[in-house]
């Protein structure tokens, strides 16, 4: 059986294999990916990439622009990272169903994306 590899961001998936391995890939741009799943309940995965060490903030906001949760607020090495949001605010309380925004700020890069929580 012949196998082939397919590059997907910083992963290579080998057909016929049961494992996913990370390759030595350093991104050359900042990027905020779409969360998955969306809509979600009870959790969603948010991925982002940074091309070099940067101070990274990833925050969740409600539709009124009020901060709901800080998921990341630290120096981050180059690479692709993922964070799971569990639909809770900074106090640990579950938030209501609705539209939320996640905002990535790293260096001079800022990007906002929308997601929906369905309870």
Image (cartoon, grey):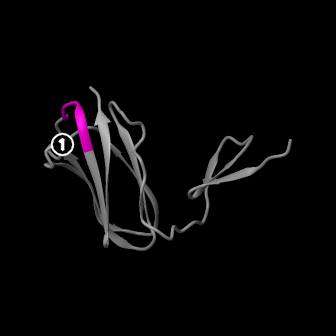
The quadrant in which residue 77 appears is: bottom left
Q: Residue furthest right?
A: 1
Q: Quadrant of the N terminus?
A: top right
Q: Residue furthest top?
A: 119
Where residue 22 appears, as percent x and y from the top left, is 59, 57
- Please name whichever residue, 74 or 27, is drawn nearer the observer in this view of the structure: 27
Where residue 110 appears, as percent x and y from the top left, is 30, 63
Q: Quadrant of the C terminus?
A: top left
Please tell me whether residue 1 is drawn above or below residue 11 in the rendered image: above
Residue at the (22%, 39%) spot, across then down? 88
Please tell me whether residue 12 is drawn above or below residue 24 in the rendered image: above
Residue at the (61%, 61%) spot, across then down? 23
Where residue 74 appears, as percent x and y from the top left, is 29, 65
Please tell me whether residue 113 is drawn above or below residue 87 in the rendered image: below
Q: Is residue 95 magenta?
A: yes
Magenta segment boundaries in residue numbering: 94-100
Q: Secondary structure at mark 1?
A: loop
> Mark 1 = which residue?
63
Where residue 3 appears, as percent x and y from the top left, is 80, 47
- Please name whichever residue, 83 or 60, is drawn nearer the observer in this view of the structure: 60
Q: Is residue 10 magenta?
A: no
The quadrant in which residue 94 appears is: top left
Residue at the (18%, 41%) spot, across then down? 92
Q: Would you call the spot at circle 1 few (<14 residues within 10 Å), some (14-19), or many (20 or more)?
A: few
> In the image, 2: left or right of 9?
right
How many labels sit on residues?
1
> In the image, 32: left or right of 97?
right
């Amino acid at each position: 059986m012949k196998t082939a590899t397919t590059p997907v961001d910083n992963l290579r998936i080998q057909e016929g294999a049961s494992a996913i391995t990370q390759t030595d890939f350093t991104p050359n741009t900042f990027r905020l990916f779409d969360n998955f799943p969306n809509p979600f309940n009870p959790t969603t995965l948010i991925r982002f990439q940074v091309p070099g060490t940067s101070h990274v903030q990833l925050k969740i906001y409600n539709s009124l622009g009020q901060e709901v949760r800080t998921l990341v607020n630290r120096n981050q090495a180059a690479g692709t990272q993922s964070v799971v949001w569990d639909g809770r605010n900074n106090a640990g309380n579950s938030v209501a169903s609705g539209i939320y925004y996640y905002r990535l700020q790293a260096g001079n890069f800022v990007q906002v994306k929308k997601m929906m929580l369905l309870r």
